[in-house]
Image (tube, rainbow, N blue to C red):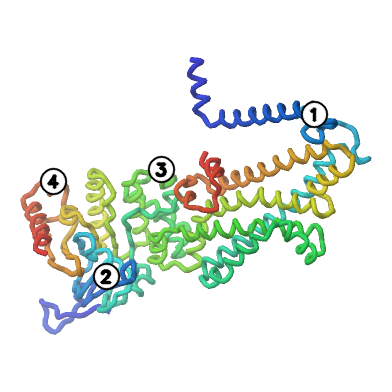
Amino acid sequence: MKNKTWKKFFASPKWVTVAWVVGLIIVWELGATYIATIKRSPQNVLPHLWQIAESVFSTQKVNGRQTAIQLVLSNAWITLARAGIGFVEGACVGFVLALLMSRFRAIEKMIFPYLMIIQMIPILGMAPIVLAVTKDIDKSRILIAAILTFYPVATSTLSGFKAVEKEQHDLMYSLAASRSQIYAKLMIPFAVPYLFSGLKIAAPLAITASILVDTLQGGGGLGCMMSQSLKHAMSIYVFWQIVFISAIIGILSYQLMSWLEKFFSNGRPISKKKLSALQVQPAGKAEVMES
Amino acid sequence: MQRLVPDPNRNNVLVPDGVEIRIEDLSISFPDKNGSSTIHALTNVNLEIRQGEFVSLVGPSGCGKTTMLRAIADLQKPSSGSITVRGQSPREVRLQKKFGIVFQSPVLFDWRTVRRNVCMPMEVQGIPKPRRTKTVTEMLEMVGLMKFGYKYPHQLSGGMQQRVGIARALAIKPEILLMDEPFSALDEFTKEKLHEDLLKIWHKTNKTIVFVTHNISEAVFLSDRIVVLSPHPGRVSAIVDVDIPRPRDLSVKQSPEFTALVAKVRNSFEEM
């Protein structure tokens, strides 16, 4: 009986997750213990996990007004709002672009190669230019999040439109469906899983970009706080809290997209076959989606 | 306009000739995949299909039977010759939404329930919702899927999916039903059941059916006439009349006439 439950546990993918988490904690703690023996201020290099957890509940004001966690969360909110707005804008632009590219071959040929070039410019190189153009810290970060979002959304949605089967097109043609009907009844619903695989890639990207650009410029946000916490002696634990909060936000943003996908695909199976044809899909994420 | 012919029973009276689909000198060719040579899918095909008739197009792969069906449905442009459907071009007939097509794979939308799949062509036509709902129920009753209306396609067996495809094709009350090897992917038992059901539906609705298949006994069981096509280049090599009385049931398959007809069709293959 007991043996059986163990077998079940090891057969499920859950134990892999558990093993990973436990493994990471062990490695982290081993590292922290070692660092503590050789460094004078080990918390700057690698504090113990319990020290970070403790700092979350600390009531000590780090900047005269807020405790560490209040400071981190208020800045997390700023980052999240910028990334969120940029993400939604970028997703809309990406979707419309995909529509246009699927509708007009000429547009696809004309702009697709250049979209890729925009994608190749490092965010850190793009940030000062965008700031110079927008002349506004908030706007510049929203714009950068949007730029990073629209490309994966546009490409994956476009590949969704292209993956519609020939017979499905024949069916709509034989019914003398108008072009807008073909999009509304066939192509857009068909491309929904593709759209979401683009959104799942883009969501953590938008947040990462927003944080990264924060570190360069002022105006609050997680990245800004992060560099300040390293430079000024407010509390090194602000830095460590930001590290964890950023990771959590990134994962949650992906998770949110998965939930939305489930919601929008009401009852329909998320086809493995179709999505495996998607090249923008990173190998690791495919497994998460199938489970 | 339909062509008029003298009434055999009355003097000097012209009546419509009852031809639903008239194919004259039809040739279709297209470049092959490499673009280096031309495939002659059909050459100089002549055929008349009467109103309410069940005609099968039979032949080995590459004989152009599917191409011919697609040409009737305006999914493929003829290279030369003409097709008229009730005196009109296939394009006009398609725009009037008088074709129902059943494909080899069911081509269902996996994000729609069975009911909403059957409903889809009517949405395209702009039929008001109460009438759509009523028709969907009628169609599902006809194909025996009333219990499965709220299931998704992936929850159904292959045979059931193909029934949904048939229900969807019939939902817009087409004049002509075009079927492209609709049962070829199904097992023998499911196939026989669907054969009987299709004949029942045909008797009830009285549509003209053009049925493409490579299965000779299927063609003999279902059809009024069998058009045997031969490949390279595709052309009509024989037309076999099936005079087995209707209504037919599965016992027909044991009759000597049936066996004789199957042999006749098969022989016309071998003569190629």
- In the drawing, does residue A134 fall left or right of residue B178? right
In the picture, which quadrant includes the C terminus of chain B?
A: bottom left
Give the chain letter at badge 2: B
Report which quarter residue A127 is drawn in.
Answer: bottom right
> Disc 3 marks which residue?
B155
Mark 4 and mark 1: Cα distance apart in space = 92 Å
> Disc 2 marks which residue?
B39
**CB within 8 Å, label 4 to label 1:** no
* Residue A146, visible in the rendered structure: no
Marks 4 and 3 on same chain: yes
Whichever of callouts 4 and 3 sits on the residue coming sooner in the sequence is: 3
Give the chain letter at badge 4: B
> Disc 1 marks which residue?
A38
Marks 3, 1: nearer the viewer: 1
Mark 3 and mark 1: Cα distance apart in space = 62 Å
- Which residue is more in the foreground, B189 or A220? A220
Specify few, some or many for label 4: CA neighbours under 10 Å numbering under 14, 14-19, or 20 or more. few
Please state the horizontal and vertical placement of residue B204, each as a whole percent of the image.
26, 56
**CB within 8 Å, label 4 to label 3:** no
**Residue at disc 2, secondary structure:** strand
Marks 1 and 2 on same chain: no
Please state the horizontal and vertical placement of residue B205, each as a whole percent of the image.
27, 59
**Residue at disc 3, secondary structure:** helix
In the picture, which quadrant includes the N terminus of chain B?
A: bottom left
Which amino acid type is shown beneath numbered disc 2? Ile
- Which residue is more in the foreground, A65 or B51? A65
Mark 1 and mark 2: Cα distance apart in space = 79 Å
Marks 4, 3: nearer the viewer: 3
